[in-house]
Amino acid sequence: MHIFVLGTGMIGTTVVTELAKYAGVKTITAVDINQASIDKCLAIANDPQVIGKVAALATEADIAEVLKGADLAIGCLPHSLSLPAIKAAISSKCHLVDLVGSHFPEKLALHEQAQQAGVLIVPGCGVAPGITNFLAAQGIELLDEAQEAMLACGGIPRYPDPPLGYQVVYRLESLLGLYTKPATIIRNGKIMELAPLSDLVEMTFSEPVGLCETVITDAHSTVFMLQGKVENLVERTVRYPGHWDKMRVLSELGFLDETPVAIEDTVISPKLFAQKVLIPKMSGHSIEDITVLRVEVSGIKHGVSTKHTWEMIDLYDHERKITSMAKTTAIPALLISQWITTKKITETGVIPIEGLIVQERFHPFLTELSQLGIEIEYKEETFVEKE
């Protein structure tokens, strides 16, 4: 079994390192445009079955050329390369597990092509989108009538620094996309969009997190996969108090706009300028982070109001020496990859994780997540109306 990992940043390197521990993988090729990034990845993995490959990854043709001879690929590329990578995987007849969940309708349109090629494409396969998706799907399956689904997740610093109380745990480009993209939700059974940074709501987690604030952000594939199964669904992103108000001010002032502006002889987009200015403000004095997750699904079971809740508070992994965000994003992707290669998953087409890890696959998958250090707590509550 020959597996390619596309992109050797923080999360790609974690995928490579963890994947090398599995029996049955003969060769892992770590691909990036940057030799220094590959060298760092190979040094961390420190495994003879891992090889590096410098290659262009800018277009569908570039990626298709890389994937010749690959059985399966794991995409750890920027959002802009996700759709080209999927098209390349289909033309190369290579299974692809992709971390990026954006532009799901365009990806779903390739479902029949993927089936004809005999491959499985799993978009949005990380922590959120990813773990949150299949927890919500399972919660809906457990109810006779699903009324509300709330998916909340956030990567936050263990030791927050002012002024934003946040440190970058993945590409700032992707982060600002999250802050500026309209949020797709399900309301009263219909798919609709809300403005970015909508509906600030407080949420409290156990120590060491405490009080946080959330806003509604894009729910990616879940609104399309779960529409018709639940009346209302939203996804929320978690930050420490005060962060969202400050980012909203930047947005309102135009600093997150993409339309270029002229500054003397230079033309630049405010968003790109903001990225350069914000990076040092979001670096933090410590690399330790926390990933928080809460999924609540409520409705009716046997005539009784019932709520299913899953919660995770995951800290920086000192044993692996990786961030919680890298771990909780990489491990679901490599587990799905392993399940594909061992034929535990045999479907073909474009199917996000919520279409795969439900019902009989749900508990075995949670067990394997736990064995790899991702612990998710579960609670069921019933509510009897007072007469």
Image: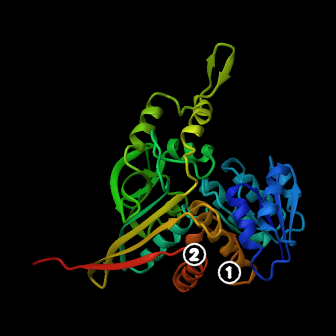
Q: Residue at x 80, y 58 (%)?
A: 88
Q: Amino acid at mark 2?
A: Gly
Q: Residue at x 59, y 39 (%)?
A: 279
Camera-side residue of 271 and 384: 271
User: Which is in the foreground here, disc 2 or disc 1?
Assistant: 2
Q: Are marks 2 and 1 in contact (CB under 8 Å)?
A: no
- Callout 1: few (<14), some (14-19), or many (20+) C-alpha neighbours within 10 Å? some
The residue indicated by pointer 2 is 373
- Callout 2: few (<14), some (14-19), or many (20+) C-alpha neighbours within 10 Å? some
Q: Is residue 331 above or below residue 91?
A: below
Quadrant, the C terminus: bottom left
Q: CA distance from mark 2 to mark 1?
A: 22 Å
Indicate left or right for 217 with 321 as reference: left
In which quadrant of the rendered view does residue 118 lie?
Answer: bottom right
In which quadrant of the rendered view does residue 246 lie?
Answer: top left
In which quadrant of the rendered view does residue 2 lie?
Answer: bottom right
The residue indicated by pointer 1 is 345
Provide residue 123's location: percent of width, then percent of height.
64, 63
Q: Residue at x 56, y 47 (%)?
A: 175
